[in-house]
Amino acid sequence: VEENGWFKLLRDLQDKFGPRTGERQGGHRRYEPFLFASAFTEIDTLSVTVRQPLTVDEILGRALSMSRCAPQTLGAARAAFEARLTAVLRELSPDGTFIEVAELVAVLARRPKI
């Protein structure tokens, strides 16, 4: 979504500053294949799409909460990462406000009734 342009900037900086652990896997793995292989084969999902405002500080906080750019992972590069992320975000939005569009998904799995 065009409004999530800030997210690509964040990912690019994660690639630059984060650990070199090989090529990043896109997205996340689906849970359903694992659940179907377990005893929990009755699966329902519920999703909601949200559109919410974010600030530079909220994006920076989120970045630092991710394992690839956690303070202990960045070490001495933390200050440079924070400065660079703040700068590129301010270039994208001088007033420091952004919009995030995200789908939140809950997967509910149960054992079949006997």
Image: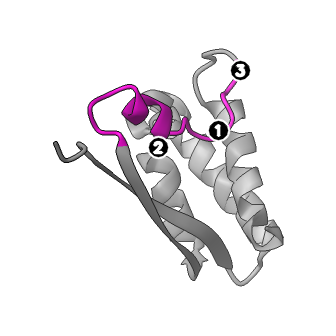
Identify which amino acid the numbered label 3 is placed on: Glu
First in residue order: circle 2 vs circle 1: 1
Percent coordinates x, y for residue 11 in the rendering: 69, 44
Please give the range of residues in magenta: 23-41
Q: Could you say which is closer to the camera, residue 88 or residue 20? A: 20
Is residue 1 on the magenta stretch?
A: no
Is residue 25 on the magenta stretch?
A: yes
Snapshot quadrant of residue 2: bottom right
Q: Main secondary structure of the magenta part?
A: loop
User: Colour scheme used in the picture?
Assistant: one colour
First in residue order: circle 1 vs circle 3: 1
Q: Quadrant of the C terminus?
A: top left
Labels 2 and 1 touching (C-beta < 8 A): yes
Instruction: Give the secondary structure at mark 2.
Output: loop
The residue where tag 3 is placed is 23
Q: Could you say which is closer to the camera, residue 82 or residue 1? A: 1
Image side of residue 46 versus residue 38, left or right: right
Neighbourhood count class around disc 1 (C-alpha, 10 Å): few under 14, some 14–19, many 20 upward: some
Percent coordinates x, y for residue 101 in the rendering: 65, 73
Identify which amino acid the numbered label 2 is placed on: Met
* Residue lying at 60% horizontally and 68% vertically, measured from the top left: 102
Neighbourhood count class around disc 2 (C-alpha, 10 Å): few under 14, some 14–19, many 20 upward: few
* Residue lying at 52% horizontally and 33% vertically, measured from the top left: 68
Which circle marks residue 66 in the picture? 2
The residue where tag 1 is placed is 14
From this viewpoint, which residue is outermost toward the front? 114
Q: Could you say which is closer to the camera, residue 32 or residue 65? A: 32
First in residue order: circle 3 vs circle 2: 3
* Residue lying at 41% horizontally and 39% vertically, measured from the top left: 71
Q: As displayed, is residue 21 above or below residue 3?
A: above
Tell which tag, 3 or 2, sits nearer the viewer: 3
